[in-house]
Image (cartoon, grey):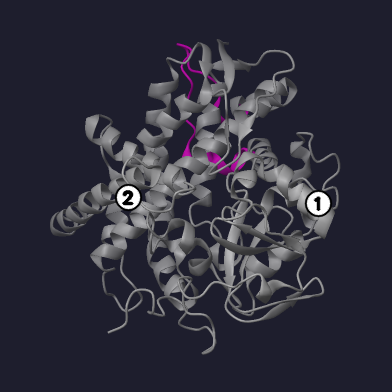
Amino acid sequence: MATLAEAPRSVDTAPADAPRHWSERRLTEADLAHIPGDAGWPLVGNTFTMLADPHAFAERMIARHGKVYKNRAFGGWQVALIGAEANELLLFNKDKIFSSEQGWGPVLDQLFPRGLMLMDFEHHRIDRRALSIAFKPEPMRHYSGALNRGIAREVASWAGPKEFYPAIKKLTLDLAADSFIGLPWGPEADKINEAFVDMVQASVAPVRKPLPFTKMKKGVDGRAFLVEYFTRETLRRRAEGGGQDMFSQFATATREDGSLLPVDEVVDHMNFLMMAAHDTITSSATSLIFHLATNPEWQEKLREEIFAVTGGPDGEGNPRPLDYDDLAKLDLTEMAFKESLRMVPPVPSMPRRALREFEYGGYRIPAGAMVGINIYWTHHSEEYWDNPFTFDPMRFTPDKVKARHKYAWVPFGGGAHMCLGLHFAYMQVKILMAQLLQRYRIEAAPGYNPEWQDWPIPQPKDGLKVSFKPL
């Protein structure tokens, strides 16, 4: 019987000679001797240098070695492929060279194994199609009602100075518990939320074993708690009939042959989706609020658009909800959100593993190499963007989007692994903006520009200090 490390898992359509799993022999410096790069410090390589300032590290490596370079960090060698063309190669993956499961696995497998992002090829296609039922119009309409109610209830008390990041993180977690799991806000939702926070923090912990008192131990314990909870709930919801929340949709989802997803797969998909949704939306909403607070002219344009679509606050000054059918009318709001995703991409890089040898940028990259793209660099490169460090939503007019390389903007990934929940993210942020901008003017101190913690998911180190002034 094959062990987990030996099992082919999700490389079912890969070449017969492809590396089967990341736990097999890692490539050595000798295997990559022909590729320029830097081994860093003994034992730890460049791990702590990258964690301290990943963007500055990437700039130095690109300046020194070019757009293809090797780097030793997190216990092994990786090859970085830089630019929109590299993004297209890895994300579109036309020739099925790259494994997402084997790329993300070393980082996430102890915490989020077998999530949709950790699947490849036919297995990924079948499960993605089954799970897509949760993002059809009828469930999405249900989520929009829950989001309008939950956001309105919470932001009504936000007047005055506020650290936005912890406030939106709590709100997003509570909204996820409500829309995704169907749980009322309260102690049970808080315990689930705490487990997710521990798991995300563990994903980039330098110590990769769950030793006592480490972040990895807290993350692994959080996963064990959620596996037990979601297993019990999946069985209950199947027995009692599904609800409108996302978890109930997943619990009763069927594959193309009509079979239900195995319970353990429902659990893993739910775990992964909660992680992927709440932290990335928290980060991207925070970035948008920062850019609107420091670019008040754009804040006013979005407010005017929202007033035109919703009709503005009612006679008692309460914001009107944003109707599901009106989401597509907020063009400027969507452009501003896209620009904030460009400025601060919530997932700054994406790893893959090469299943067979390929060539790129004049270099032969061997089978088994861990490879990755740098989304942040591409989003800030003058090759694709004028004045790339300036906030300008007009970059996303249809004509400018059409003229630009398709893979110069990839906050949601691309190809078969394009984020399944991207429309949910747009919906949640638009409803948040509709509630906030009908109620408040968002202000920041002159010249305010906080430092950001870049990994595992970007967040302002000071919590983002803004003030909500009632209109």
Residue placed at 45% from the left, 68% from the top?
A: 119
Q: Residue under circle 2?
A: 220
* Magenta span main SS: loop
Circle number at residue 399: 1
Quadrant where the N terminus sits is: bottom left
Residue placed at 66% from the left, 38% from the top?
A: 340
Residue 158 sits above or below residue 407 on the image: above
Work out whether residue 302 can be spotted: no
**CB under 8 Å between callouts 2 and 1?**
no
Nearer to us: label 2 or label 1 = 2
Q: Amino acid at mark 2?
A: Val
Q: Position of residue 437 (x, y in %)?
A: 57, 22
Quadrant where the C terminus sits is: top right
Residue placed at 43% from the left, 54% from the top?
A: 135
Residue 187 sits above or below residue 38 on the image: above
Q: Is residue 220 left or right of residue 331?
A: left
Q: Earlier in the sequence, mark 2 or mark 1?
A: 2
Single out the residue that lies furthest toward the front.
Answer: 42
Element assignment for label 2 = helix
Residue 396 sits above or below residue 248 on the image: above
Q: How busy is the neighbourhood of tag 1: few (under 14 within 10 Å), some, or many (20 plus)?
A: few
In this view of the protein, which residue sits in the foreground, 109 or 126? 109
**Residues rendered magenta in the picture:** 308-330
Q: Is residue 205 left or right of residue 401?
A: left
